[in-house]
Image (cartoon, rainbow, N blue to C red):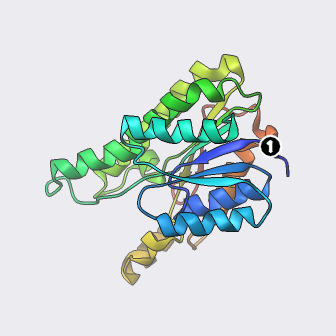
Amino acid sequence: MDLKNRVAIVTGGASGIGRFISLELAKQGCQIVVNYHRSIDKANSLIKEIEDMGIKAIAVQANIGLFDEAKKLVDAAKDTFGQIDILVNNAGITSDQLMLRMKEEQFDQVIHTNLKGVWNMCKHSARHILKSSHGRIINISSVSGVAGNAGQSNYSASKAGVIGLTKTLAKEFASRMVTVNAIAPGFIETNMTDQLDEQTKRSILELTALKRFGQPEEVAYVVHFLASDKAAYITGQTLVVDGGMVI
């Protein structure tokens, strides 16, 4: 349990990749703050699973795209545990459409959650994480933010923005030995990929060197590594976890 007694916030931590991140960090001894927006049943189920491991965890509802709600989340973590060591910015949404058909609201909503939400969380948690001797910020970006993707001008822009924010904060926080890194997953098996039709799935696999979708725990393992002391000399980087899609 190499993260024992550390406290981690995982946004969007109740379902999908976020759930596996929350569980992996808990297995390593982290006390967990699970953020959710609407998935209260999933959040409560996850909290029970973590507590059954003997690890303390709380669930906090917040729309992290809203400045004050992000602050409420951070304050709840600090009030409950007295410290914040790790922030995993995982929450994100999609609203795909080709540029010519995309509505302004679709662009704004995705930027609001995926980019502004990450900034909000970093802004409010920074003063606590900077006091930690093991401070880590890990932002979940996407291969869409690295290579772009047709029909995702909003999502790709938001995830590319996350990479730029990651590099900037890595420079700003380096003097306090806080590392800031990003992870760019490719196509990971979640409810989102389950909705793809078979032709789309085959097209994706054809572009992927390993010829399979990733598993959510494979992203969680990378989060664990970046949160650990073994990654103390890595900062400002984007680790692509995509099975060789954007080689």
- Residue drawn at (77%, 59%), measured in percent from left and top? 27
Note whether 167 is above or below 141 in the view shown. Answer: above
Q: Nearer the viewer, residue 92 or 36?
A: 36
Q: Quadrant of residue 78?
A: top right
User: Which residue, given by chain and number where applicable, does mark 1 sit on?
Assistant: 5
> In this rendering, would 82 be left or right of 127?
right
Residue 25: tell me if it is visible. yes
Horizontal and vertical percent for residue 234? Answer: 71, 34
Viewer-proximal residue, 237 or 217? Answer: 217
Q: Nearer the viewer, residue 24 or 179?
A: 24
| Picture residue at 79% right of the left edge, 54% below the top | 28
- Mark 1: give few (<14), some (14-19) or many (20+) Cα within 10 Å: some
Question: In this rendering, is residue 6 above or below 93?
Answer: above
Q: Is residue 191 left or right of residue 214?
A: left
Residue placed furthest toward the right: 1
Q: Number of marks in the image?
A: 1
- Residue visible at 78% across and 64% down in the picture: 53
Q: Secondary structure at mark 1?
A: loop
Q: Residue at x 42, y 73 (%)?
A: 203
Q: Amino acid at mark 1?
A: Asn
Query: What x and y, as percent, mark residue 16?
Result: 53, 65
- Residue 39 picture location, percent across and down: 46, 64
Query: Which residue is farthest front?
Result: 79
